[in-house]
Amino acid sequence: MAEVLVYVDHVDGAVRKPTLELLTLARRLGEPVALALGAGAGATAAVLAEHGAVKVLTADAPEFADYLVVPKVDALQAAYDAVSPVAVLLPSSAEAKEIAARLAVRIGSGLITDAVDLEAGADGPVATQSVFAAAFTTRTRVSRGTPVVTVKPNSAPVEAAPAAGAVETLAVTFGEKSTGTKIVSRSPRESTGRPELTEAAIVVSGGRGVNGAENFAVIEALADSLGAAVGASRAAVDAGWYPHANQVGQTGKSVSPQLYIASGISGAIQHRAGMQTSKTIVAINKDAEAPIFDLVDYGVVGDLFDVVPKLTEEVKARKG
């Protein structure tokens, strides 16, 4: 059976959820072969095998941590040459999309980014994308070379499918340009205890209607009751009410959770572009004419300061 190369996103051996989703999609196309790079790469094998990887290629070298993406592109190209896959799949993170683009240029292949679904086709893999601020859904395939595809988080279920997961060390030769940009310092992100925004199954976001940084406590309380991530609209971020790292939208992060709750967000196209592929959308806004109500599954016309605390209480009561 044909093999599909999957780039592994992990932190010191802890595999992140989008990679496990990629393995689910890869099994639709062939047998997944995973590539794990850097410190802890070998520790990923058991989890990857549990989710369908027939083979796990690993490589560790100082270059992966000390320099920007080019060493990782070198490794992915080496894996591509060794495997000759029918497709290369990566998560749609900022770094992985750059790696994907550089690989596609090197191997002379087409690139598809931010896919939300993937299936086998008669002429190769067919990707589903949500484009033009989610106003259109397209089905796309690469017409030349091996498809290189990045996939949005929460686009596929995580499914256990035990496989061999044979571990092999990948020999990587780094090019002259691999050490052109050096990382001189790192600062760990302060943990909030909440899920990563782009990977969360539930996201609760606040906008201009929150009316102040101190009022985001209402949004956070609902998020915590649901085990959700907290997002913010551009208006809220620009006002300094919430960090830019939590911005959802065209100039922020793109999310596609199972449930998205928008509180005090009008629904400008900039925000819609980052969340419109959410599976279920709930909006709370006191303006019945707000554009956000055009795309929601459920809408509540009311003051968020009345609605959200009551919703939080109800969630806690049901959990209790």
Image (cartoon, rainbow, N blue to C red):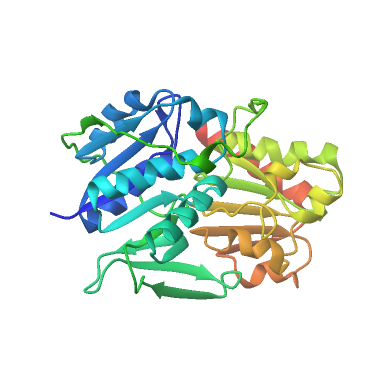
Nearer to the camera, 228 or 67: 67
Q: x and y percent of residue 149 in the render?
A: 40, 58
The N terminus sits in image quarter: bottom left
Q: Position of residue 215 (x, y in %)?
A: 82, 40
Q: Would residue 257 be visible to someone looking at this image?
A: no
Q: Position of residue 103 (x, y in %)?
A: 43, 54
Count of numbered marks: 0
Residue 134 image-quadrant placement: bottom right
Closer to the camera in the image, 59 or 113: 59
Any part of residue 120 in sight: yes
**In the depicted view, which residue is nearer to us: 266 or 147?**
147
Q: Residue at x 83, y 43 (%)?
A: 241
Asked if residue 263 is positioned above or below residue 72 in the image, the reply reads below
Horizontal arrangement in the rendering, residue 3 relative to residue 11 (left or right):
left
Q: Nearer the viewer, residue 25 or 143?
A: 143
Q: Is residue 163 left or right of residue 57?
A: left
Seen at 37% across and 52% down, the residue is 89
Whether residue 166 sits left or right of residue 238 in the image: it is left
Q: Residue at x 57, y 75 (%)?
A: 135
x, y percentage for residue 187? 67, 25
Q: Work out whether 105 lies above or below 222.
A: below
Farthest-out residue, front:
176
